[in-house]
Structures are given as C-alpha cells and as structure tokens.
Amino acid sequence: MGSLDQDAPPAAPASPSFLSDRSAKVFVAGHRGLVGSAVVRKLQSLGFTNLLLRTHSELDLTRQSAVEAFFAAERPKYVILSAAKVGGIHANSTYPADFISVNLMIQTNVIDASRRSGVEKLLFLGSSCIYPKFAPQPITEDSLLTAPLEPTNEWYAIAKISGIKMCQAYRIQHGLDAVSAMPTNLYGPCDNFHPENSHVLPALMRRFHEAKARGAESVVVWGSGSPLREFLHVDDLADAVVFLMENYSGLSHVNVGSGKEVTIKELAEMVKEAVGFEGGIVWDPTKPDGTPRKLMDGSKLAGMGWAPRVELKEGLAETYKWYLDNVVKQ
C-alpha cells in the first residue's frame, strides 16, 4: 500500500510487478469502449494472456449481484475500470440522471467487489471534467473540489469525483491498492461517432465526412470556436495506464494529458483537412462553448518518467481511417 501523503513520491511497485505477471487475470471493465479497447490492445501487445472481458449483455456492471458473482467466480488479480456512461454537452444536458446514477453504480459495484474478492490492484479512470470550470491553468491535481464545476457536465463529473474518493477511502480503510487516473480529452479508434451524443472531435469528423459525401458547401459548428482544448490519443492513455499499474501506488489521482492545446477553431480546421472536406466552416455562437480552457498539468506523471508519443495531426489521420473502415462501411 502506498503512502497516504498526497505529496509523497509514488511507492515502489509491489513484487511481483504488474509487468512481470503477464499470465495473471486482468479484468478490463468496458473493453469495447474507446479507452477499454485501447487498454486491451496494449495489454495484448505486451503479451498478457489472461484478460477477462465481458460485454454489457454478459455482465451488467450496474447490477450488484451480477458483479459480485463474476468476481467470486473469476477472482481477477488486477482490475482496470474504464467502463462508464460518457457523452458530450448535449448528452449530459439531456440525460443527467443516467450520467450520475449509471456511473455511480458501476464504480461502487466494481470497487467494492474488488476489495471483497482480494484484487491486488485496481486502476480507476475518470475525466478532466472533474475540475472546476474556472480552475487555474494548467490544472493541477490539487484543484479538485476548490470551486464550482462546469454546469453542462456536472452530473458525470460528480460521479467521477465520487470514484476518486471511493478509491481513496478503500485504500485508507481496507488497504485496497486502488489508484485513479484522470485523462484529458481523448480520441482514437472505437470512439463514439453518434451524431448527437458524441464529443467534439468525433462529432466534427462525422459532420465533415457527411458534408464531403453530399457535396455540401459548408459545415455548421457549435459555439464561437474560441475555447482551448487538449487532446490525447487513446493509445497514449493505454500506455499511461500500464505505466501507472507498474509504477504508482499513491493516494492522489494522477492527470494524464498531452500538454498541448488547440482552439476549437484550430481543431475544426485540422479535422477538416484530415477528412478532405473542401467547403467552409460556419460558427454558431448561439450554442454553448462549455469550459473556456481546460489544460491539464501533467508534471506529476512526467516526473515519474512517462510522456505521450502520438502527435494530433498523425492521430487524426489514423482515427479518420478507422472511422471509414468501421463506421462508414457498416
């Protein structure tokens, strides 16, 4: 168990370490999602041979009895909790009850069952939306709970904050080696390209692609285009997940970001280029912008020796190829 001092350096990895135990059972919750699928690809590339993967129809994580039965039967040694109900501004505003209740149920059931069944280590994945709307930039881990949240996604944010606190509480009271990672805005293969319920980057990619396909002269994009956003390729996050499983056992959550930010206008131009759309962009300032700026301070993780690898332009091209192969062709 790591130190309970939030400012203390990470404890040395337990022996045997995560990477030295590649035949151990690893439960990746949410393996079909953007994050979970990337974690599975990473673990498989590293030679992990005993991944526990269940679809929602096979295991409903909101059902306590089903989760407890699964953990009792399978006894995973490690858990990576990436299962969550996620979405953009529109989805959060439309389904607030779902965003708080579903995520709270998933987290509570998996973390508690992990403790009861003797899981050696659990990593909980949250989101940068846990931080206050006007947090000082770049956002450090200790900005948590210092000011009001962004109203458009507070239901999801409160659920994720509860997950962080639950990991801390179970570490303090039960000695569960539960750590939390808070990634910035993610993108990549297996993203959600739903026309209404997706995040900004995949939503833009779909709009530009469909405009290109029908020969449209322009695409309307929500907001002013002025907010600044940071994006991290999901394969970089998966790499950070493995790094933290191997190297970190502290009480505090850890930011995971690229350290680079672009305006939404710049992002739209980059996505437009990746898609090959040659029309114009029309901004609709009557629609909400969301948080004006959201850049993570990744110095804590960088100080441990981790750095991202995928540049945004390269990642967008790869993501668009995946979209063409897996969404358009279906």
Image (spheres, grey):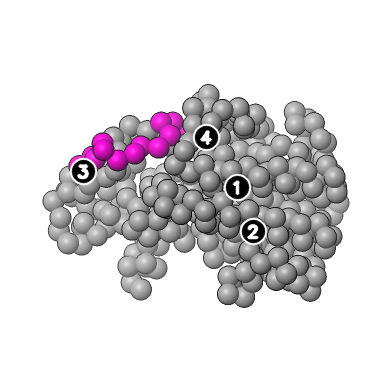
Q: Earlier in the sequence, mark 3 or mark 1?
A: 1
In the image, residue 260 lies in the stretch drawn in magenta: no
Of mark 2 and mark 1, the one earlier in the sequence is: 2
Q: What residue type is labelled 4?
A: Leu
Which numbered disc covers residue 281? 3
Question: Mark 2: which secondary structure?
Answer: helix
Name the residue carrying label 4: 149
> Three-letter amino acid code at disc 3?
Ile
Regarding mark 4 in the picture, which secondary structure is present there? loop
Residue 230 vertical position relative to residue 196 in the rendered view, above or below: above
**Which amino acid type corresponds to the residue marked 2 in the rendered image?**
Ile
Mark nearest the camera among 4 and 3 is: 4
Residue drawn at x 24%, y 40% as measured from the top left: 284
Does residue 223 appear to the left or right of 230 in the view shown?
Answer: left
| Closer mark to the observer between disc 3 and disc 1 | 1
Query: Which secondary structure lies at badge 1?
Result: helix
What is the distance, in whole Å, between disc 1 and disc 4 at their CAs?
Answer: 12 Å
**For discs 3 and 2, the disc positioned in front in the rendered view:** 2
Could you tell me which quadrant the C terminus lies in?
bottom left
Residue range highlighted in magenta: 281-295
Mark 3, secondary structure of its residue:
strand
- Residue type at mark 1: give it: Ala
